[in-house]
Amino acid sequence: MEQQRRFYPIGIQTFSELRNKPYLYIDKTEHVYRITHSDSKYVFLSRPRRFGKSLLTSTLQAYFEGRKELFKGLAIEKWETEWTEYPVLHFDMSMGKHLDKEGLERYLLWQLKTLERNFGIESDIPDTNTRLTDLIRRACEQTGRQVAVLIDEYDAPLLDVVHEEEDLPILRNVMRNFYSPLKACDPYLRFVFLTGITKFSQLSIFSELNNIENISMLPEYATVCGISEEEIRTQMAADLEILAGKLGTTPEEAMRQLKENYDGYHFTWPSPDIYNPFSLLMAFSQGKLGSYWFGSGTPTYLIEMLNKFNVPPSKIGGTEAMASDFDAPTERMTSIVPLLYQSGYITIKDYDTNFDAYTLDIPNKEVRIGLMRSLIPYYITPDSLSTNSMVIRMARTMARDDMDCMLQLLQTFLSTIPYCERTDTEGHYQQVLYIIFSLLGYYADVEVRTPKGRVDVVLRTPTTLYLIEAKLNRTAKAAMQQINLKNYPERFALCGLPVVKVGINFDLERKTLGDWAIETQQIQ
């Protein structure tokens, strides 16, 4: 018998639509009950874009509206018995982007007017904060019950100006003014829930509302957004078999590929591995692996901030920090780490309890390759067509472990692209090699410590470990001499792979590889 087609909720952010149609729903209602019955009635959750924040907010709306029928068969039925209906004010700030002060104020007034209609309220109050106060009070008095206020993507109007010293304070004041009534309206409020990408600053937007509980890093909410491996194996087992068939492999191999590409997120520690839900569902829907989340939009401000803080590609991950260093307000950040973490480009990979230190790194292959692709215009060339063609050809040569052919291709490629600034240092070419090798899908690292020095680039393929030393306006022979003089291979003697030494000389005048030397390390 042919299995009924499964619909995947890609872009579906309304809980009622998802439940009334044959969409897959990963049950998060246990979290909904826990959130709404916690000690605090003011709650904030930060997660990257397309991680299910809007669907969670819509689920909370359905819960507070007492729509019991939508929750039939879900986990929340074990605990909820009353299903009380409350008045709900659901604000969606996602459309408040790219607006100036007047446009943002009009957008807020439009949302208020839309919600006022739900309660038959007419108002011509011009100030957004006074009008919000009036709406909360009148909704409570009209229904005889306290109000649930749900604010989705609270920070959306500020994200594109977070790096702008002139526009950020102006728009921040608009939002601060709008949110200011929430504390004064406490007697009228049953629950307040806010989602966003960046962490709020109580000193800026929520200057008066100082009793918000930030649940973003609490262990009990580790899986509140995203999809865990257990959820895939229990709630998507049949889907995994279908995907494996489309990929021409086994379910376990399909799982391994999904894990490599879309898994690896942790928002607390310890935590189950969390898969990017957008990319995961797209892979099941399309029947193939692709760069779905990263391809859906890389904010321009991210690239601008990488340049502002002078962060080279190889330094985006591999960071050790305390929680206060990355789970911090982005408008006052002194490094790019908070923005990278809260936007989902790096995530928690380990935690040292002795020193309260977290290890942060790029979560998975999709993000690593996506980041490298977005940085190519700044380090190599804006010509994406020639870059993609080059990467495909290089990947084929490296699949054969033909480093010599790969370097020939790179030499030709670099010699044909226009002049790029910042090409007069060894560090620039070190980053070029890092970007190229990362695009090939292999593990690469730079400035790797050994007992006698640092290896410029370490590249690991499934079959070989390459130790690469790069020189500028010298010779490949000089680069190889340094590898041998400092005995870099000794540090990797137990890696379990053949070690190949590669000395490369870059020609500053030609802006490409001059010559290179390749030697296989002899096993002692």
Image (tube, grey):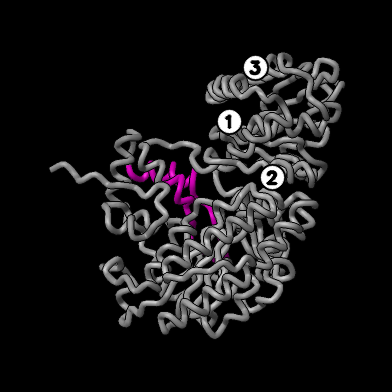
The answer to whether 211 appears left or right of 14 in the picture is right
Residue 488: which disc?
Answer: none
Q: How crowded is mark 3: few (under 14 residues within 10 Å), some or many (20 or more)?
A: some
- Among numbered discs 2 and 3, the one appearing first in the sequence: 2
Q: Nearer the viewer, mark 1 or mark 2?
A: 2
Mark 2 touches mark 3? (CB < 8 Å): no
Where is residue 185, by image quadrant?
A: bottom right
Residue at label 1?
Answer: 440
In what element is the residue under mark 3?
Answer: helix
Residue at label 2?
Answer: 301
Q: Residues within 10 Å of mark 2 (few under 14, many from 20)?
A: some
Return the x and y of residue 244 as percentages of the image width and height.
Answer: 33, 40
- Among numbered discs 1 and 3, the one appearing first in the sequence: 3
Mark 1 touches mark 2? (CB < 8 Å): no
- Among numbered discs 1 and 2, the one appearing first in the sequence: 2
Return the x and y of residue 300 as percentages of the image width and height.
Answer: 66, 41
Residue at (79%, 56%) from the top-left corner? 334
Task: Check disc 3 and give the amino acid type.
Answer: Leu
Q: Up-down: is 3 above or below 334?
A: above
Residue at label 3?
Answer: 409
In what element is the residue under mark 1?
Answer: loop
Q: State the extent of the magenta-drawn residues as a range.
A: 251-280
